């Protein structure tokens, strides 16, 4: 059941005395219009609230993102320096050989 149907059913239930057809339809349409306006205002207010919260949180999100990126850069720099050592070379050769063996094992199927 749509919102309009629910509103119309509620308005029929609220009617205490019979009104002339034109007056009743006019009243119902006025009430339905007011409900739609209220619903639209609530949606607009919620969208505005979400936009304000997002705008207020943007500096903190950007700061966290930059801190995370800086930490990742430092970790990758240390990892790259470790790969330049003889132990890093040995490990990278072992990982490369393992990867090639996996590729060839998959290719045989």
Image: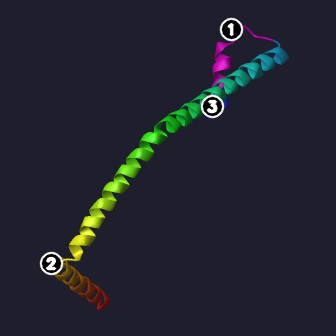
Mark 2 / mark 3, whichever is N-terminal: 3
In the picture, the quarter occupied by the C terminus is: bottom left
> Is 38 drawn above or below residue 58 in the view shown?
above
In the picture, the quarter occupied by the N terminus is: top right
The residue that label 3 is drawn on is 44
Q: What numbered label is drawn on residue 87?
A: 2
Q: CA distance from mark 1 to mark 3?
A: 34 Å
Name the image quarter holding residue 40: top right
Task: Find out whether the residues at labels 1 and 3 contact each other: C-beta distance under 8 Å.
Answer: no
Q: CA distance from mark 2 to mark 3?
A: 61 Å
> Is 99 drawn above or below residue 19 in the view shown?
below
Q: CA distance from mark 2 to mark 1?
A: 89 Å
Q: Nearer the viewer, residue 79 or 58?
A: 79
Q: Nearer the viewer, residue 61 or 26?
A: 61
Q: Is residue 11 left or right of residue 19?
A: left
Task: Find out whether the residues at labels 2 and 3 contact each other: C-beta distance under 8 Å.
Answer: no
The residue that label 1 is drawn on is 16
Q: Determine if residue 5 is in view.
A: no
Residue occupying the point 84% across, 18% down: 22
Which label sits in the foreground, 2 or 3? 2
Percent across and percent down for residue 72 are 32, 59
Q: Which residues are magenta?
A: 6-19
Q: Residue furthest top?
A: 17
Which label sits in the foreground, 1 or 3? 3
């Amino acid at each position: 059941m749509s919102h309009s149907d629910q509103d119309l059913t509620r308005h029929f239930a609220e009617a205490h005395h019979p009104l002339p057809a034109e007056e009743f339809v006019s009243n119902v349409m006025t009430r339905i219009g007011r409900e739609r306006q209220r619903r639209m205002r609530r949606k607009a207010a919620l969208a505005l609230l979400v936009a304000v919260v997002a705008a207020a949180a943007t500096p903190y999100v950007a700061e966290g993102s930059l801190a995370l990126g800086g930490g990742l850069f430092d970790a990758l720099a240390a990892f790259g320096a470790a790969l330049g050592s003889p132990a890093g070379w040995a490990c990278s050769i072992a990982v490369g050989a393992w990867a090639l063996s996996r590729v060839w094992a998959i290719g045989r199927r």
